[in-house]
Image (spheres, helix red, strand yellow):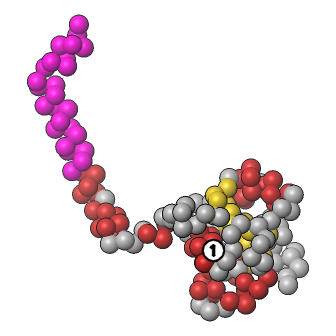
Amino acid sequence: MKLQQILRDRETWKGILIILALSLFIGTVSNSGLIRKFLRGEYRQAFFSREDYPGLVFITLPEMEELWHNQAALIVDSRSVPEFRSGHIPGSISVPLEEVKGGNSSLLDRLKPGQPLIIYCEGRDCLTSLNLARLLHERGFRDLRVFSGGWEEWVAAGLPVEKEDDAIQE
């Protein structure tokens, strides 16, 4: 019975509406900078259409670990060369997005369009792996997987790490 009384009580509803309105106002004001950036389209690179990129799949750490262990795909590190040299997933090759975008397309010569590729970058907030995957898709690559957890998740899981001194570079 008390619940029915509360639901009929005008003052209760008025209070609920005031709380919701204040929450909306405070949330909008405190995030106004992000909202303006979103409306200007500054976050578009973080979104993609599955119809535009049908061969692009996001994979989890267990999927990544299995593919790495079985050597079922070429692993591509999209981070900068200094980041790659300081540590990377064993067997991965360095294809820094910024260098490819800067015109160094010879980095892509090691990749075969029919070959499954796994692309990773620093971690969840990093978009270089997604942007490199888009660029590769535009150049004819279709079997693309993005390990969204990236380097951070790989290291946090205690998985093997290779450094430039340990690696044999091509």
Amino acid type shown at disc 1: His
Q: Quadrant of residue 90?
A: bottom right
Please say whether residue 17 is one of the residues in the magenta stretch. Answer: yes
Place of residue 21 in the rendered image (x, y in percent of width and height, measured from the top left): 19, 43
Q: Which residue is mark 1?
A: 137
Place of residue 147 in the rendered image (x, y in percent of width and height, measured from the top left): 67, 61
Please say whether residue 19 is one of the residues in the magenta stretch. Answer: yes
Assign the N terminus to one quadrant of the image.
top left
Q: What residue do we see at 73% from left, 72% from top?
A: 76
Q: Main secondary structure of the magenta part?
A: helix
Q: What residue do we see at 17% from left, 36% from top?
A: 17
Q: What residue do we see at 73% from left, 90% from top?
A: 106
Place of residue 170 in the rendered image (x, y in percent of width and height, measured from the top left): 85, 84
Seen in the picture, residue 2 relative to 153 is either above or below; the reply is: above
Mark 1 residue element: helix
Q: Quadrant of residue 150?
A: bottom right
Number of residue marks: 1
What's the magenta region? 1-25
Between 109 and 99, the one lying in front of the other is 109
Task: Report whether 74 appears left or right of 130.
Answer: right
Q: Quadrant of residue 22?
A: top left
Place of residue 92 in the rendered image (x, y in percent of width and height, measured from the top left): 79, 71
Between 63 and 126, the one lying in front of the other is 63
Residue 38 in sight = yes
Between 142 and 152, the one lying in front of the other is 142
